[in-house]
């Protein structure tokens, strides 16, 4: 047209420029605009708008502003809000929202009014830079003018409120928007429900979910996953499972993440059968389990001390090419530590390093805890040094087992020195660490040192709690130090603490054990005066004290009083009477009580063991043996003690064959013998001249990680000396 000298109209340029903007050829728009000016054509509002848009897209706001000024100075051009909206959009896109707001505020000077696009653009821009207050004001202003905000602007504002922690404000905003017949997007609902769940407002999230469905918005897999996860975290597994069924009914396919939440919920409750069933469902649904799925199940099995299933899954992961992560190894190492299998735990830790999986502070913490449980503080402190060298920062969960481990091995003073060094190094310890230290010192009879440590910790700003006072009270009672006991109680009351059930019960128990029932009953009265009603444990402690002192009639009266109150006697309470009857040799009365306990479903392994011991003491081995069988018939499982009582009596009466037979029966029942059980059988073998068998048992216990002690070697020495004496004619 130019080459042929056709007359070019403004509308021709306007049409071409608008089309070029649509295909984002912004540089060509500006080039053609320059051509137009050369031709001496006067731009119209559409041309100006296209040029402003192009300058904004090319982030040249100086050029955009110049064009707007030209347009305003062009007396023949009618101004349009569209042009300004383009400038506002460009500024907001580049986060220059305050300049954009200023453009909107000056519109009235130009005799223009902001429209719904202006407001929605500004709300989106303000939300982008998290200017929440101005965004809310802009939204209110828009609604006040009768404009209906876009879903995008509503969603952005709801999301911003959610991120700022203003969950209820976001919730009410959704409600208000519904009244305007404007429903935010599903994303907003999901985001808001997620925040409500994270803040513990599950009921509000469920309410929003219900209203969402009523308003015609269909929940997707994300919606369901959010609620299912929250239900699981709150232990509401039935409700979570109902939602899984709702998903199926609504043809919403559950993802592996939904199943992971359910598996985690069941694992935390120790319901491993249900968790295992869900794992099978993952496979049957054609979904692929993730490392999280396996790790969650492994953690659950480890907590339930089912290491067999935990390691089965660990090996299954390798078979499916799912590499274990730090959390997987940490869960397994923790499980081995709790089972006191530290050799295996160390081997697995090395395997973890070989697979280039980086341990974190929790991994080291569970390893340290495991070694401290076995009293191996040397290895535990080596691990502490190793983790700090690797730049892993220890925390209170690291220090607590180390303090406990030192105290466990009779080195409470070293534990105190360790705590002092930590404080000098500005390491903050909590009241739990302090309590462990106090308990260790009190256990060793170092009450004065414990009181000094307590005072120093309080001065260092460690939060003192009732448990700390309880430990000091235990220490004073152990030492029978009534003066310090009085001072501790006085200090406790001064700090605003009152003894609770635990503290009162421990004091009453201490006086009962020392035979001072008069003081025990004084404390009972004081407890009542303090408004701390004695519970079943307190009552049982006092009943036990009365039985031991021979006041069985008074114990029975107290027990009857319990029946009339809310503190219903339990198996431990009745066990006190059972223990007294068996010690006095009243086995027929003991059996009558036992039958009553069976009817009330109160009989357990401990009460059966009391009866077995009573019959063994009287040499009535047949009846004791029958009880062992009866236990299983009544669904009560015998433990190591149940078998050990009988094994000892068989050994003592020269029936080693019966003892070994019972030992093998115990092993077939998958009951692990402890050190006492081994020592009893080793002693039995030695006194019956079976020294080879005794040595075999000593080797077996060592192999199984049960360390022999002085009693073990004394028995073996006794057996060796007896045989040598026999050969020497001694």
Image (tube, rainbow, N blue to C red):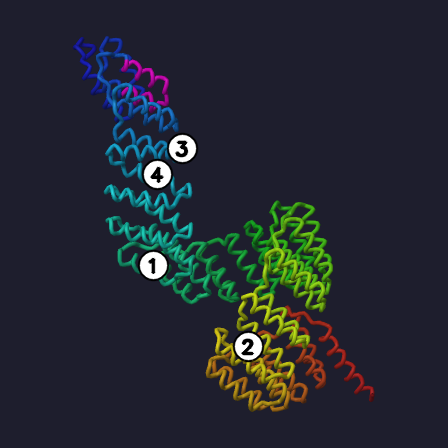
Mark 2 or 3, closer to the camera? 2
Circle number at residue 572: 2
Of mark 4 and mark 2, the one earlier in the sequence is 4
Q: CA distance from mark 1 to mark 3?
A: 43 Å
The image position of residue 457, as x and y in percent, is: 67, 52
The image position of residue 128, as x and y in percent, is: 38, 34
Q: Residue furthest front?
A: 529
Contact (Cβ within 8 Å) of mark 1 with mark 4: no
Give the magenta part as a residue range: 50-72
Looking at the image, is 126 positioned above or below residue 204?
above
326 part of magenta stretch: no
* Residue at 59% in and 63% down: 499
Looking at the image, is 122 positioned above or below residue 260?
above
Q: Which residue is mark 4?
A: 157
* Residue at 44% in and 59% down: 264
Q: Residues within 10 Å of mark 1 (few under 14, many from 20)?
A: few
Which SS does the magenta portion mostly show?
A: helix
Q: Which residue is mark 3?
A: 129
């Amino acid at each position: 047209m130019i080459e042929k000298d056709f007359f070019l109209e403004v509308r021709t340029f306007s049409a071409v420029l608008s089309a070029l903007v649509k295909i984002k050829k912004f540089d060509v728009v500006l080039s053609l605009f320059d051509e137009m000016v050369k031709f001496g054509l006067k731009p119209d509002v559409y041309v100006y708008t296209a040029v402003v848009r192009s300058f904004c897209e090319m982030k040249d706001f100086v050029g955009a502003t110049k064009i707007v000024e030209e347009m305003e100075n062009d007396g023949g051009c009618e101004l349009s809000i569209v042009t300004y909206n383009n400038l506002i959009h460009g500024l907001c896109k580049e986060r220059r929202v305050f300049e954009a707001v200023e453009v909107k505020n000056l519109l009235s000077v130009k005799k223009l009014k902001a429209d719904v696009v202006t407001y929605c653009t500004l709300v989106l821009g303000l939300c982008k830079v998290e200017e929440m207050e101005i965004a809310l004001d802009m939204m209110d202003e828009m609604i006040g003018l009768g404009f209906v905000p876009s879903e995008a602007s509503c969603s952005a504002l709801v999301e911003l409120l959610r991120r700022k922690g203003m969950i209820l404000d976001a919730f009410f905003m959704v409600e208000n928007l519904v009244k305007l017949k404007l429903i935010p997007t599903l994303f907003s609902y999901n985001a808001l429900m997620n925040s409500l769940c994270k803040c513990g407002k599950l009921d509000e999230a469920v309410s929003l979910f219900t209203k969402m469905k009523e308003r015609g918005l269909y929940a997707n897999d994300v919606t369901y996953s959010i609620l299912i996860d929250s239900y699981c975290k709150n232990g509401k597994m039935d409700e979570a499972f109902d939602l899984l069924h709702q998903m199926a009914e609504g043809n919403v396919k559950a993802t592996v993440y939904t199943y992971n939440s359910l598996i985690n919920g069941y694992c935390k409750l120790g319901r491993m059968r249900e968790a295992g069933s869900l794992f099978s469902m993952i496979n049957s649904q054609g979904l692929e389990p993730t490392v999280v799925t396996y790790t969650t199940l492994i953690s659950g099995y480890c907590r339930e001390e089912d290491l067999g299933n935990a390691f089965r899954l660990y090996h299954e992961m390798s078979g499916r090419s799912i590499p274990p992560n730090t959390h997987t190894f940490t869960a397994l190492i923790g499980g081995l530590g709790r089972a006191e299998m530290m050799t295996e735990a160390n081997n697995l830790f090395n395997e973890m390093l070989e697979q280039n999986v980086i341990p974190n502070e929790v991994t080291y913490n569970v390893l340290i805890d495991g070694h401290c449980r076995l009293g191996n503080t040397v290895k535990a402190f080596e691990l502490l040094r190793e983790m700090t060298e690797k730049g892993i920062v220890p925390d209170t969960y690291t220090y607590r087992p180390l303090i406990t481990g030192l105290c466990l091995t009779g080195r409470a003073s070293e534990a105190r020195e360790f705590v002092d060094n930590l404080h000098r190094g500005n390491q903050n310890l909590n009241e739990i660490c302090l309590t462990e230290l106090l308990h260790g010192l009190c256990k060793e009879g170092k009450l004065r040192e414990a009181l000094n440590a307590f005072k120093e910790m309080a001065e260092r700003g460690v939060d003192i709690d009732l448990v700390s006072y309880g430990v000091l009270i235990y220490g004073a009672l152990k030492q029978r130090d009534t003066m310090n006991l009085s001072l501790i109680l006085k200090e406790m009351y001064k700090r605003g603490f009152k003894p609770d059930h635990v503290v009162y019960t421990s004091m009453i128990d201490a006086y009962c054990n020392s035979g001072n029932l008069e003081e025990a009953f004084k404390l009972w009265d004081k407890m009542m005066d303090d408004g701390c009603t004695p519970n079943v444990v307190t009552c049982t402690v006092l009943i036990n004290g009365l039985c031991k002192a021979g006041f069985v009639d008074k114990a029975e009266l107290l027990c009857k009083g319990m029946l009339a109150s809310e503190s219903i006697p339990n198996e431990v309470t009745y066990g006190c009477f059972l223990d007294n009857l068996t010690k006095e040799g009243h086995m027929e009365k003991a059996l009558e009580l036992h039958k009553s306990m069976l009817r009330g479903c109160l009989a357990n392994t401990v009460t059966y063991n009391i009866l077995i011991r009573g019959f063994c003491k009287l040499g009535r081995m047949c009846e004791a043996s029958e009880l062992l069988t009866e236990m299983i018939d009544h669904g009560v499982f015998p433990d190591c003690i149940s078998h050990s009582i009988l094994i000892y009596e068989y050994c003592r009466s020269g029936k080693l064959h019966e003892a070994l037979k019972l030992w093998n029966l115990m092993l077939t029942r998958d009951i692990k013998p402890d050190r006492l059980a081994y020592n009893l059988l080793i002693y039995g073998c030695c006194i019956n001249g079976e020294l080879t068998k005794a040595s075999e048992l000593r080797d077996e216990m060592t192999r199984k990680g049960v360390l022999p002690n002085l009693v073990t070697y004394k028995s073996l020495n006794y057996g060796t000396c007896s045989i040598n004496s026999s050969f020497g004619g001694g």
